[in-house]
Image (tube, rainbow, N blue to C red):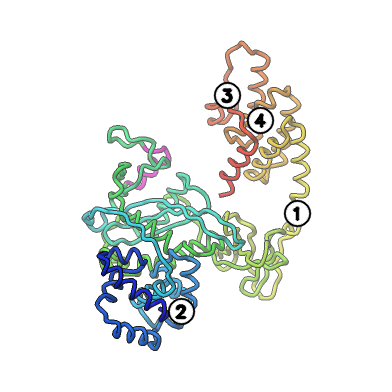
C-alpha cells in the first residue's frame, strides 16, 4: 500500500468509527476486509507508521511474480487467489510458497490498488456424506471463452463427482450435449474412476428424463436402454431441491471459474487435456474446503467399493491426441517427418491439429474443434520425409460450389434453397453429387407450389436429405392435384418425416434458418 493511500485509509477508518459505524459497515464502505479494519483500529498512529515502513522494506516470496499478478487482477478483478496460484503453478511448476501465503499476498495487492471483487454468496444446507461407493452426482455447465483468434465461443461441460471422496471427472465439447454424448461421457467417467457407484443423482434434464409421473421416472429411450445394461439406480432432483446435488453444482462452478476463466481456447482436444491435468493437480489433488481431505487420497479407498467396469458398452472414445502446430504450407511436423493436411487448414500462426498414434505404424490427424479426421498416414521407418496425400492439394469445393449454386437457382427462393443444400453438403460431403442429382430430378417432376412447400417442410424440420425432399415433393404434388381428398400416406419417408409431414410448416425468415443451422452444426 502506498504511504499516502495507507494514511488516508487509516484516518478514514478511525473517523468512521468515531461517527458510530460498525466494523463490518466500515469494511463495506471502504471496500476492505473486516480483519483489516480491526487491525487498523487497534493500532496507534506511531504503530501504523512503522507498519507502513516495514511493508516497504520487507521482501515477500511472491514478489518475483508481483507485476504478473497485478496485471491478472487488473484485467480480471473477479480472479480468485486460488486461480492465481494455479496459473503460477501451471506456468512455473514449482513455487517457493504455499497457497495461504499467496492468498494473503493477493489480498494486500487488492487493498493497495483498490481492486475489489464482489463475492457471490449462496446458502447451502449441510448434507451427510453417503457411504463409500454409494453415490455420484452429475451436472452440466456452459462457459464463454476466448479462442486464439480473439473470438468469444461457448463451450459445454459435463461434470461428475463421487459424493464421498469428492473425486471428480469433467469433459468438455464445443456443442450442446445430446443423449449419445451423455452416454459416451458416462462411460469415459467410469473408465476414469475404474468403476461406477450404486446411484447417480441428476437434474431433470430432457436428454435423460421424459417426465416424472407421480414419482415414476420415464426416461428417454436411449438412456433407458443404457440403464438396463449398466444397472445403476437414478435419483432425480426436484426442481426446488438444489441441495440434493450441491456437491456437483460446486464442481461445475469450480471448473468454470477456476479452470476455464481467463484461459485461451486452442481446440477441444487440448482443452480437455489441460482440464484433466488441472483435475489431477487441483480438483482432485488439493485439500477439499469442506472435508479437509485430499480427494485423490480418499478415492483410493472409495475405489474398492465401486462396481467394476469390465468393458465399455460403446466403442472406445477418442484417445486424447497430442497437439501439433500447422505450418503455412499446410504441413504438420511430427517426430522428424512432415505430413500434409488439406489445403486451407492453415488459418494463421495459431492453427493447431490433434495427432493420435495407432500403435507404432499409423497416425491420424484431426481437427481440434470438430474432431473430424483430416488425414491418416503410415509412419515411415526413416526421418526427414514429406508424407503426402495428393488429395490435400486439391480444392474440391471449387467444383462443388458452382454446382450447388446452379441447382439452388432453380428454386423460387434460391437463398433458402442454397442454405438447405449446403447443410446437406455438410452432413453428407461424400455423396453431395448424388444428392444434387436426386434434387434436380425431383424439380423436373413437380410444379412450383409443391417444390416450394417441400423446401419449407424440409428446412423447418431439418430433414437434410435429398430423399426426404423428393418424397415431400411427391406428397405436396398429390395435395395440389387432389385438394379435397384426404392426405394419403407418404411411402418411403423416414420415420421422423412421416410423423411430421401432415403438419403445416410455419414459414420463417431466412435468417432463422441460417441461425438454426449454425446452432445445430457450428457448435
Residue drawn at 73 percent across, 57 percent down: 391
Q: Of circles 1 and 4, which is in front?
A: 4
Of the residues under marks 1 and 4, which one precedes in the sequence? 1
Helix, strand or loop for disc 4 = helix
Residue drawn at 43 percent across, 66 percent down: 79
Q: Are marks 4 and 3 in contact (CB under 8 Å)?
A: no
Q: Which residue is mark 3?
A: 504
Q: Which residue is mark 2?
A: 66
State left or right for residue 208 relative to residue 417.
left
Residue 422, numbered label: none
In space, the residues marked 2 and 1 are separated at their CA atoms by 51 Å
Label 1 CA crowd tier, 10 Å (few <14, some 14–19, many 20+): few
Quadrant hosting residue 112:
bottom left
From the viewer's side, name the closer residue of 416 and 105: 105
In space, the residues marked 1 and 4 are separated at their CA atoms by 29 Å
Q: Does the magenta portion include 136? A: no
Q: Of circles 2 and 1, which is in front?
A: 2
Amino acid at each position: 500500500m502506498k504511504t499516502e493511500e495507507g494514511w488516508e485509509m487509516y484516518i478514514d477508518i478511525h473517523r468512521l468509527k468515531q461517527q458510530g459505524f460498525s466494523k463490518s459497515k466500515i469494511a463495506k464502505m471502504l471496500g476492505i476486509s473486516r480483519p483489516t479494519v480491526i487491525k487498523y483500529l487497534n493500532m496507534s498512529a506511531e504503530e501504523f507508521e512503522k507498519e507502513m515502513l516495514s511493508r516497504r522494506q520487507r521482501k515477500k516470496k511472491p514478489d518475483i511474480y508481483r507485476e504478473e499478478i497485478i496485471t491478472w487482477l487488473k484485467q480480471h478483478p473477479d480472479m480468485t487467489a486460488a486461480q492465481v496460484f494455479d496459473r503460477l503453478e501451471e506456468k512455473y511448476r514449482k513455487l517457493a510458497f504455499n497457497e495461504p501465503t499467496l492468498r494473503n499476498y493477493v489480498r494486500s495487492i487488492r487493498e493497495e490498488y483498490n481492486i475489489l471483487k464482489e463475492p457471490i454468496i449462496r446458502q447451502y444446507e449441510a448434507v451427510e456424506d453417503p457411504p463409500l461407493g454409494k453415490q455420484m452426482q452429475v451436472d452440466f455447465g456452459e462457459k464463454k471463452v476466448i479462442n486464439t483468434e480473439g473470438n468469444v465461443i461457448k463451450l459445454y461441460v459435463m461434470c461428475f463427482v463421487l459424493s464421498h471422496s469428492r473425486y471428480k471427472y469433467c469433459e468438455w465439447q464445443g456443442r450442446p450435449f445430446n443423449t449419445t454424448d451423455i452416454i459416451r461421457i458416462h462411460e469415459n467417467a467410469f473408465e476414469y474412476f475404474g468403476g461406477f457407484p450404486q446411484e447417480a443423482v441428476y437434474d431433470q434434464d430432457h436428454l435423460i428424463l421424459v417426465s416424472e409421473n407421480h414419482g415414476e421416472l420415464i426416461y428417454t429411450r436411449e438412456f433407458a436402454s443404457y440403464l438396463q445394461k449398466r444397472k445403476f439406480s437414478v435419483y432425480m432432483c426436484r426442481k426446488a431441491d438444489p441441495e440434493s446435488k450441491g456437491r456437483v453444482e460446486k464442481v461445475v462452478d469450480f471448473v468454470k471459474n477456476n479452470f476455464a476463466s481467463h484461459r485461451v481456447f486452442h481446440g477441444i482436444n487440448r482443452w480437455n487435456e489441460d482440464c484433466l491435468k488441472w483435475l489431477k493437480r487441483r480438483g482432485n489433488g488439493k485439500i477439499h474446503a469442506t472435508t479437509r481431505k485430499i480427494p485423490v487420497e480418499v478415492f483410493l479407498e472409495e475405489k474398492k467399493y465401486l462396481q467394476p467396469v469390465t468393458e465399455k458398452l460403446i466403442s472406445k472414445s477418442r484417445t486424447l491426441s497430442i497437439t501439433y502446430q500447422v505450418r503455412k504450407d499446410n504441413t504438420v511436423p511430427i517426430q522428424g517427418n512432415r505430413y500434409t493436411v488439406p489445403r486451407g487448414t492453415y488459418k494463421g500462426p495459431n492453427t493447431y491439429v490433434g495427432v493420435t498414434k495407432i500403435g507404432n505404424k499409423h497416425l491420424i490427424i484431426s481437427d481440434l474443434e470438430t474432431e473430424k479426421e483430416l488425414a491418416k498416414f503410415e509412419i515411415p521407418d526413416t526421418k526427414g520425409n514429406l508424407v503426402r496425400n495428393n488429395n490435400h492439394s486439391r480444392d474440391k469445393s471449387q467444383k462443388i460450389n458452382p454446382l450447388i449454386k446452379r441447382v439452388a437457382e432453380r428454386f423460387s427462393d434460391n437463398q433458402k434453397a442454397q442454405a438447405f443444400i449446403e447443410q446437406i453438403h455438410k452432413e453428407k460431403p461424400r455423396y453431395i453429387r448424388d444428392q444434387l442429382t436426386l434434387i434436380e430430378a425431383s424439380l423436373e417432376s413437380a410444379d412450383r407450389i409443391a417444390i416450394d412447400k417441400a423446401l419449407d417442410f424440409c428446412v423447418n424440420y431439418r430433414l437434410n436429405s435429398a430423399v426426404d425432399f423428393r418424397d415431400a415433393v411427391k406428397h405436396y404434388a398429390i395435395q395440389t392435384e387432389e385438394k379435397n381428398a384426404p392426405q394419403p400416406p407418404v411411402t418411403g419417408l423416414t420415420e421422423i418425416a412421416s410423423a411430421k409431414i401432415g403438419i403445416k410448416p410455419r414459414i420463417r425468415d431466412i435468417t432463422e434458418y441460417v441461425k438454426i443451422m449454425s446452432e445445430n452444426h457450428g457448435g
